[in-house]
Amino acid sequence: MNRPTFPEIYMHMAFELAKRSTCRRLQVGTVISSVDYRRILAVGYNGNATGLDNVCDREEPGNCGCLHSEENATINCVERRDTPKIVLVTHLPCVQCAKRLINLGGVQKIYYAREYRSSDSLEIFKKVGIEIEHLPVSGK
């Protein structure tokens, strides 16, 4: 029997969440979990703010105006800063989302499935001691 790991299961969930994204360029999903994987603490996907049109504000890559999935997940997470957390993201976080995840507090590890156009966040995570792992599961 080939049982999927919890990181694989939650990464697949992140890809399902990404399907709700309204961004025309890149659909991204995020799951924030407890470190024992028994609770999902928050989810997010990229898109415009609630109540605004479900479209990008601009065509410029990296500046479409959408909230990033990690940003929405951190907004949705009501756990205390000192609660240990695991983050699973369909794509490597950008630098700004790396900083948001750091400020969320308690993030011990980040899994990502696909590369992003910039890998600058890897150095930022390393600098603050957050483990990061490439988990190449396929999104459907």
Image (cartoon, rainbow, N blue to C red):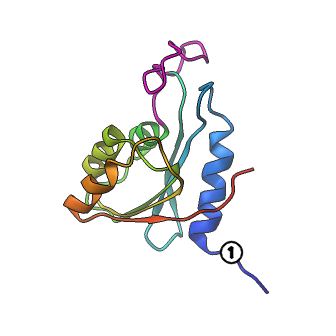
Is residue 79 rendered to the left or right of residue 61?
left
Q: For this rendering, which residue is in front, 118 or 109?
A: 118
Q: Residue drawn 75% across and 50% down?
A: 140
Where does residue 118 sit, x and y in percent of width and height?
40, 43
Q: Which residue is mark 1?
A: 4
Occupied quadrant, residue 62:
top left
Residue type at the position of mark 1: Pro
Examine the rendered structure and indicate whether residue 17 appears above or below residue 129: above
Q: Is residue 3 left or right of residue 59?
A: right
Residue farthest right in this picture: 1
Q: Is residue 114 above or below residue 50?
A: below
Nearer to us in this view, 124 or 31: 124
Q: For mark 1, does the 10 Å Cα neighbourhood hold few (<14), some (14 to 19), or many (20 or more) residues?
A: few
Q: Residue at x 59, y 28 (%)?
A: 25
Near-viewer residue (49 or 19): 19
Q: Main secondary structure of the magenta part?
A: loop
Residue 114 position, x and y percent, is 55, 52
- Considering every residue shown, the one lying at the far bottom of the view is 1
Q: Give the structural element (helix, strand or loop) at label 1.
A: loop
Q: Quadrant of residue 7?
A: bottom right
- The span picked out in magenta is 49-68
Asked whether 124 falls inside the magenta stretch, the response is no
Closer to the camera, 88 or 114? 114
Q: Position of residue 107 (x, y in %)?
A: 33, 60
Q: Residue at x 79, y 87 (%)?
A: 1
Residue 27 picture quarter: top right
